[in-house]
Image (cartoon, rainbow, N blue to C red):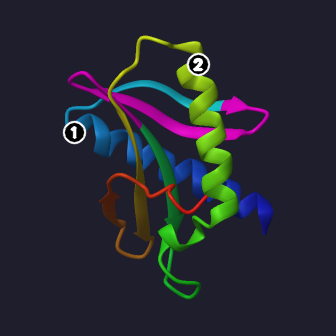
């Protein structure tokens, strides 16, 4: 099951990259790994850097894809973003978004929801 989830995650990230490029984002990096966790996609639009978490599902049996963003996952993302920002001190405008993707293989159709400004206030 883990291997399937990894393949689905990578598939979703490819969909996300195309979506972001179509929306005018310039992808700076992807799968940026730190010991604290991974940032799926780092992109730029205008002067703003956007850190994207990509969640992909093929059905709603376990809820919406973004429901997988629990406090533990958000804390890891937050720590990784802080590390990235420390490495790039010139960044002054940034946000953290989620791309929630539900893919229907039978119809080859992706529903993509761009959730802006994830809330880290409860961490």
> Does residue 31 appear in the picture of this structure?
no
Identify which residue, 34 or 21, lies in the foreground: 34
Pick the front one: 12 or 81: 81
Instruction: Tell me residue 74's x, y (percent).
Output: 60, 55
Q: With respect to residue 97, does 105 lie above or below?
A: below
**Dot 2 lies on which element?**
helix
Residue 106 image point, x, y percent: 42, 76
Q: Does the magenta stretch include residue 57?
A: no
Q: Which residue is drawn at 52% across and 83% down?
A: 63
Q: Which image quadrant for residue 100?
A: bottom left
Q: Which of marks 2 and 1 is nearer the N terminus?
A: 1
Query: Is residue 114 visible to us here?
Result: yes
Q: Circle 1 sits on which residue? A: 22
User: What secondary structure characterizes most of the magenta part?
Assistant: strand
Label 1 neighbour load within 10 Å: few <14, some 14-19, many 20+: few
Q: Is mark 1 on a helix, strand or loop?
A: helix
**Magenta span:** 33-50
Q: Residue at x 64, y 26 (%)?
A: 83
- For image coordinates 50% across by 70% down, the residue present is 65
Label 2 vs label 1: CA separation? 29 Å
Quadrant of the drawing holding the C terminus: bottom right
Q: Where is residue 21 shown, x and y percent of the image?
A: 28, 34
Percent coordinates x, y for residue 70 in the rendering: 62, 67
**Which numbered disc, 2 or 1, marks the residue closer to the eye?**
2
Question: Disc 2 marks which residue?
Answer: 86
Q: Would you say 4 lies left or right of 45 here?
A: right
Q: Is residue 114 left or right of residue 98?
A: left
User: In this rendering, is residue 41 above or below 90?
Assistant: below
Q: Residue furthest bottom?
A: 61
């Amino acid at each position: 099951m883990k291997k399937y989830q990894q393949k689905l995650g990578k598939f979703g990230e490819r969909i996300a990259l195309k979506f972001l490029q179509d929306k005018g984002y310039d992808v700076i990096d992807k799968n940026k790994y730190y010991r604290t966790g991974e940032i799926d996609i780092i992109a730029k639009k205008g002067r703003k850097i956007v850190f994207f978490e990509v969640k992909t599902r093929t059905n709603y049996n376990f809820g919406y894809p973004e429901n997988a963003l629990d406090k533990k996952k958000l804390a890891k993302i937050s720590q990784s973003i802080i590390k990235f920002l420390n490495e790039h001190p010139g960044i002054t405008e940034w946000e953290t978004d989620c791309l929630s993707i539900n893919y229907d293989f039978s119809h080859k159709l992706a529903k993509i929801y761009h959730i802006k400004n994830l809330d880290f206030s409860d961490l």
